[in-house]
Amino acid sequence: MIRKAIYPGTFDPVTFGHLDIIKKAKDLFDEIIVTVAVNPTKHPLFTLEERLDLLKKSLHDYENVYVDSFNGLVVDFAREVGAVSIIRGLRAVSDFEYEFQMALMNRKLASEITTVFLIPHEKYTYLNSTIVRNLASLQSDVSDFVPPAVQSAIREKFSK
Ligand code: COA
């Protein structure tokens, strides 16, 4: 049996912190589906198609990792693809309350699916996509935080 996990998020844009979580997750499961949330509560800088494209470009070397998108409940998508786990990253204590609440709600909705928390390298503790967008909007170099494909895409966004 292939053990699949999904890694849901907004990925606006994908950062080295996300890639670090994916690297760890792909060694624990046979297949990882990185799934981009349409997420109507957020107003992303990158369109869904752009976020999918940047993930695909950033993950082309990863054999057992696939990219997809979903609209609706995370657990519905997990069931649809036959995943046994939902991967989430925990960067700091500040992430805990939100993540704990989401994991409990997902367990209530689908008790057969287990949330697995992974801790990224401490050098990514302070990193999130908002910081990357802010730095890029001020023409600051973001090469330490995002893969090359994202670097050029975000530079282009803010040069318009
Ligand atoms: N490294 C760097 N940054 C990271 C990170 C990591 N390892 N993990 C998370 N982040 C950052 C993201 O960049 C993002 O930053 P931003 O807010 O500045 O843009 C932030 O942490 C939160 O990101 P994300 O993991 O994408 O969570 P989210 O809250 O945007 O979306 C979903 C999480 C997709 C699961 C959720 O919102 C969703 O859409 N759920 C569907 C509805 C549902 O199922 N509800 C029931 C369950 S409660």
Image (cartoon, rainbow, N blue to C red):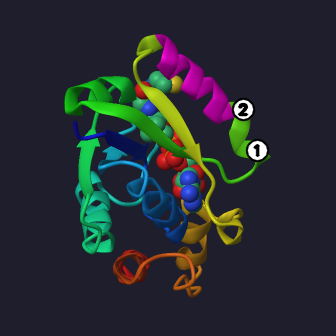
Q: Specify start and end residues of the magenta stretch as a single range.
A: 98-108
Residue at horizontal 30 percent and vertical 49 percent from the top: 30
Judge left or right: residue 2 versus residue 46: left
| SS at badge 1 | helix
Answer whether residue 41 is visible to the viewer in this image. Answer: no
Distance from Cα at disc 1 to Cα at disc 2: 7 Å
Q: Pointer 2: what residue?
A: 97
| Percent coordinates x, y for residue 84 in the rendering | 36, 31
Q: Is residue 102 magenta?
A: yes
Amino acid type indicated by mark 2: Glu
Near-viewer residue (46 or 28)? 28
Amino acid type indicated by mark 1: Ser
Q: Are marks 1 and 2 in contact (CB under 8 Å)?
A: yes
| Percent coordinates x, y for residue 144 in the rendering | 57, 83
Q: Pointer 1: what residue?
A: 94
The label shown at residue 77 is: none
Location of residue 128 by image quarter: bottom right
Rendered position, 116 above or below 79:
below
Residue at horizontal 47 percent and vertical 42 percent from the top: 87
